[in-house]
Image (cartoon, rainbow, N blue to C red):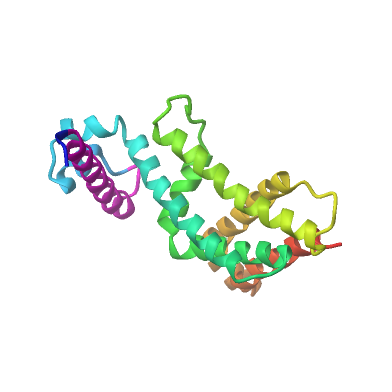
Amino acid sequence: MGTAERREREKIRRKNDIVDAAERIFFSKGLETATMDDVAAEAELSKGTLYLYFKSKEELYLAINERGFHILQKLFAAAISNEQSGLEKVRAIGRAYFEFAQKHADYFNAMLYYESRKMDVSEKNSCARACEQMGSETLKIVAQAIRIGIDDGSIRPGVHPFRTAVVLWGQSSGIVQVHSLKAKHLKEKHDVDPDEIMRLSLEMMARSLQK
């Protein structure tokens, strides 16, 4: 292995170590409270070294968001591999998304942060650009499942795959937030099972796609 190769591997390892440290700090303290000094101390690096890899706390948080997208894409791939019809693939993706939001809430919150802000994605190798690309790839998985459903007849014709994928994503994200923020209120004040709301949401979305 040449010197340049070793340096590149070391750079990648150091960058991953920094993101590992940032996850521990951001997930325990919260993004607003955590500082780059906290991350540097956790990573056992100087703050100057930290800034060689990430120019801001926001960019570091977006690197965490990239990891979340990787997990979500794997969940989607596993979900659709076990189903035959396009409609059932869409249902499975919905269940996987809800599972992701519950089991990986910190990553889900990182995604919400990214989606709620206008990001500069013009820089070629930036974390924001990577997040935009991964978000698009994730939506394309949903769109492909819809396309399969149209072809096999389980989803009505005339549905635009990618636009519909965006709608389903928006609806699912909203329901997940209701579940996260209002679960106790729904249960105590209205005797409503929050998990049933999520299941009902999936069923309504699936019915809207059927012939």
The residue at the point 84 percent across, 57 percent down is 156
Q: Position of residue 119 (x, y in %)?
A: 48, 30
Q: Residue at x 47, y 40 (%)?
A: 131
What span is in magenta? 4-32
Q: In the rendered view, would you say 182 is above or below 36? A: below
Q: Nearer the viewer, residue 181 or 99?
A: 99
Specify whether 113 is left or right of 60: right
Q: Nearer the viewer, residue 146 or 205?
A: 146
Picture mark count: 0
Q: Main secondary structure of the magenta part?
A: helix
In percent of width and height, residue 155 lies at 80, 60
On screen, residue 61 versus residue 181, left or right, reads left
Could you say where residue 47 lies in the image, as x and y percent from the top left? 17, 34
Q: Magenta span has 14? A: yes
- Side (left or right) of 156 relative to 90: right
Residue drawn where x is 60% and y is 48% of the image: 139
Q: Give the residue drawn at x 25%, y 42%.
A: 12
